[in-house]
Amino acid sequence: MFRALIDWLIDLQVSWLLMWIGLILFLTTAVLLIYVNMRLHLIEKALYLPAFCYILFIGGVPEIHLFNPAMVAAVLLVASFTLLLKSFESERLSYCFFSAPAFISTAAFFYQYAYIYMLVVWLAIAILRPGYWREWVFSILGYAFPLFLAFSWFFLVDDDYTRLGVFFNEIVTFQRITPLLSISTIVFFASSIAVAIIAFGHIPRYLESKKMIVRNRYYLVILMTVVTGGMIIAVPDMIPFAWYLLAFPMSFIMSGYLADTKSKRWGIIALSVLFVGVAAAQAVFLYMK
């Protein structure tokens, strides 16, 4: 689907729009983080801080700033996890476990590895939810719904029912692509992960005074981080585009640390590391241009 969209823009001779589309999607994701925080109160002291951290995390990786499939998938996945986080508002049976997998399934049409995030859905049902068996059924039906629509289109309109089989083959086949990263980007990755580890260590103290609903939401954010990190370790070829997916939960973890830490000095140091990393990566990228 992503390749078809790119080909269509090139045929219209408006390929210059790729940069602007990428910027709009990037900022859309940042705005969604603000909405998530305002709606679900993950970071109460600084509502806009997650978007700021997200911009910093992405800003230090110039290689992924142009329009790419991970950008589209990131918007859909943020929408999906917003619904998952919302499901903790009540212990009643939640239909969010139908809608959230539907967004994940749609994201897989753009970024093949998005389907792995069904692990987060099932772990949330198994560990954090009361144990309704119907939520398992909802998750499977929700993921299958976009696939059913795609199959219907291929079969009824294109008269080619084999297309869905080709799609499945594409998403489960790991593409061996060696990413080309500048030294400054690699350094930025390392420094960002180091800062994120420090923020992770602050989470237990941050959650001590929080209600159970907020704790469960944070546990889900941690699950998202762990699953994404595991995906990157298992399939290093996902770098650098998987950074879009990892930056989402890391932004909340980093924001919680900055908003709650009593040592302002360490907060300033953490932000300074990210600022310097972004400036260095952008300077090297512009020099190479």
Image: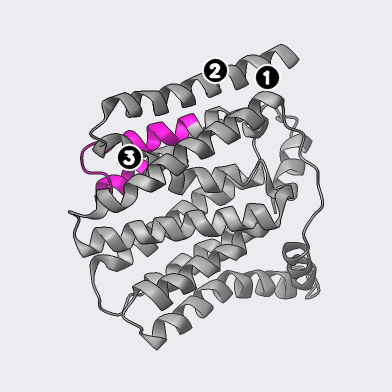
Q: What residue is at 41 percent from the left and 70 percent from the top? A: 124
Q: What residue is at 46 percent from the left and 31 percent from the top? A: 55
**Extent of the magenta region:** 32-56
Q: Residue 35 placed where, x, y %? A: 32, 45
Q: In which quarter of the image is the C terminus?
A: top right
Q: Residues within 10 Å of mark 1 (few under 14, many from 20)?
A: some
Q: Looking at numbered disc 2 in the image, what kind of residue is underneath it? A: Ala
Query: What distance separates the C-alpha of mark 1 from that of mark 3?
Result: 30 Å
Q: Looking at numbered disc 3 in the image, what kind of residue is underneath it? A: Tyr
In the image, 269 versus 134, the foreground residue is 269
Q: Residues within 10 Å of mark 2 (few under 14, many from 20)?
A: some
Q: In which quarter of the image is the N terminus?
A: bottom right
Is residue 26 visible from the viewing direction of this image? Answer: no
What coloring was used for the rendering? one colour
Q: Quadrant of residue 158?
A: bottom right
* 3 vs 2, front mark: 3
* 1 vs 3, front mark: 3
Tell me the chief SS of the magenta region: helix
- Residue that badge 3 annotates: 257
- Which numbered disc flags the more N-terminal residue, 1 or 2? 2
Q: Determine which of the numbered discs, if any, sits on residue 285 in the image.
A: 1
Q: Is mark 1 on a helix, strand or loop?
A: helix
Q: Looking at numbered disc 1 in the image, what kind of residue is underneath it? A: Phe
Query: What distance separates the C-alpha of mark 3 from that of mark 2?
Result: 22 Å
- Which numbered disc flags the more N-terminal residue, 3 or 2? 3
